[in-house]
């Protein structure tokens, strides 16, 4: 970043990401307001008309993702953004985009859950994002920024990869990154890469008509589509693994973390080194495809892995799955707005940490008893007799 030409300005993460999308060629945005990502549509509502683009606040998240489908089918770079429960509503549309092999960028500025949850930060959507989220056998490339600079930079990569593979790409920051302000150089990280779009529906004069679809009823065509998608995903896994390391050359313990949790973990590793512990950081940039090769290479020389997440343990399963069982893998996390501190991570590294859930279990007062009904056995099983339709049951 130091060598990049341009003025360094103080900017909020959501705004930096929105401007990055515009400079990457995004000309259509469809979305629906939800905290903590509202600065994205607010900014784009003013910015896109300045470059001849289109902004539309849809009536729902379901409408938003399907409007994106229409725009990218016509050949326009388009995106949407939302936050956790809103992204859940978009899952069918994302599956349609993947099945139809259409490029789109989806931004999820995560908030806490499950259910309605709240506006506090979290990384609870890792599994939803990296496992497809909607129905069917499909994958989305998932990019995880950890600075406001990457909030600006990653839309360039996201649109490039979306068009390269004709596939949805998700950018997965959390509420902290969306709302925080940092110095950022808002000039493109490199040339804007585009790809030929010989699949779009832009009029059939002089050529055979095109039909974009994800449903094939002839013979084994639907099965064949899934095999074609599988080969594409394998190519992604081979070519698109991205990660970053800090102090791993001499480390005997490596923290694996992404996003805001990685920022905090870097501070924890720095404190640990000041005490004589040789601790490094491995930061996945692509959450899918997960950077298997880089992590395996590092674990050939380390004794211990600590996965730090702002959830109750999601990425840790991917870490355990790709490493030799002989590698010691530990986990430390805080869910639903709880943010790990460098001090708490350091305590865990030193063998002095405690599980926050276990601490709180002993402090729950009478006012919160309904949250722990399962501990008290307050719901008792009872026997009832089956009855016919329309008849009253045993009260």
Image: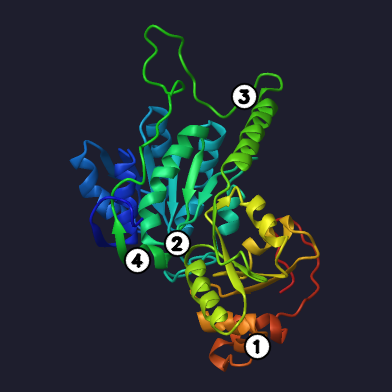
Looking at the image, which is closer to me, 239 or 356? 239
Nearer-N-terminus badge (4/2): 2
Location of residue 15 by image quarter: bottom left
- Give the residue pinned by disc 3: 216
User: Is 119 rendered above or below residue 355?
Assistant: above
Location of residue 240 by image quarter: top right
- Tag 4–tag 2 contact (CB < 8 Å): no
The span from disc 3 to disc 4 (Cα, nearest Å) is: 43 Å
Nearer-N-terminus badge (4/1): 4
Location of residue 335 by image quarter: bottom right
**How was the colour assigned to the protein in this rendering?**
rainbow
Left or right for 103, reference 250:
left
Q: Under tag 2, what secondary structure?
A: loop
Please name the residue shown 26% across and 39% down the image: 54
The span from disc 3 to disc 2 (Cα, nearest Å) is: 40 Å
Q: Under tag 4, what secondary structure?
A: helix
Residue 122 in the image: state x and y as whole percent. Answer: 50, 68
Residue 350 in the image: state x and y as whole percent. Answer: 64, 84
Would you call the spot at circle 2 few (<14 residues within 10 Å), some (14-19), or many (20 or more)? Answer: many
- Give the residue pinned by disc 1: 352
- Tag 3–tag 1 contact (CB < 8 Å): no
- The label nearer to you, 3 versus 4, is 4
């Amino acid at each position: 970043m130091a060598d990049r030409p341009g003025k360094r300005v103080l900017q909020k993460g959501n705004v930096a990401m929105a401007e990055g999308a515009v400079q990457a060629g995004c000309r259509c945005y469809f979305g629906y307001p939800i905290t903590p990502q509202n600065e994205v549509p607010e900014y784009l509502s003013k910015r896109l008309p300045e470059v001849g683009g289109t902004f539309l606040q849809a009536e729902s998240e379901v409408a938003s993702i399907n409007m994106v489908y229409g725009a990218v089918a016509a050949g326009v770079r388009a995106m949407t953004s939302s936050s956790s429960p809103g992204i859940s509503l978009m899952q069918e549309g994302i599956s349609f985009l993947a099945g139809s092999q259409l490029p789109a960028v989806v931004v999820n500025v995560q908030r806490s859950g499950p259910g309605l949850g709240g506006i506090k930060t979290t990384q609870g959507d890792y599994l939803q994002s990296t496992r497809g989220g909607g129905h069917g056998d499909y994958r989305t490339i998932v990019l995880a920024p950890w600075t406001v600079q990457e909030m600006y930079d990653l839309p360039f990569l996201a649109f490039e990869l979306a068009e390269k593979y004709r596939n949805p790409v998700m950018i997965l920051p959390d509420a902290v990154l969306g709302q925080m302000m940092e110095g950022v150089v808002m000039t493109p990280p490199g040339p804007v890469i585009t790809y030929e779009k010989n699949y779009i529906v832009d009029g059939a004069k002089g050529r055979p008509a095109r039909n974009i679809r994800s449903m094939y009823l002839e013979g084994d065509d639907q099965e064949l589509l899934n095999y074609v998608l599988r080969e594409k995903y394998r190519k992604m896994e081979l070519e698109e693994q991205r990660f970053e390391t800090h102090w791993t050359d001499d480390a005997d313990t490596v923290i694996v973390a992404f996003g805001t949790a990685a920022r905090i973990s870097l501070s924890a590793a720095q404190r640990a080194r000041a005490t004589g512990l040789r601790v490094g950081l491995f930061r996945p940039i692509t959450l899918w495809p997960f950077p298997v090769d880089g992590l395996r290479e590092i674990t050939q020389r380390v004794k211990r892995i600590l996965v730090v997440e702002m959830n109750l343990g999601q990425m840790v399963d991917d870490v355990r799955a790709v490493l030799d069982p002989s590698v010691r893998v530990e986990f430390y996390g805080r869910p639903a707005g709880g943010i790990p501190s460098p001090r708490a991570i350091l305590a865990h590294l030193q063998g002095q940490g405690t599980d926050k859930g276990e601490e709180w279990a002993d402090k729950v007062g009478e006012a919160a008893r309904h949250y722990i009904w399962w501990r008290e056995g307050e719901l008792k099983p009872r026997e009832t007799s089956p009855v016919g339709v329309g008849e009253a049951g045993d009260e």
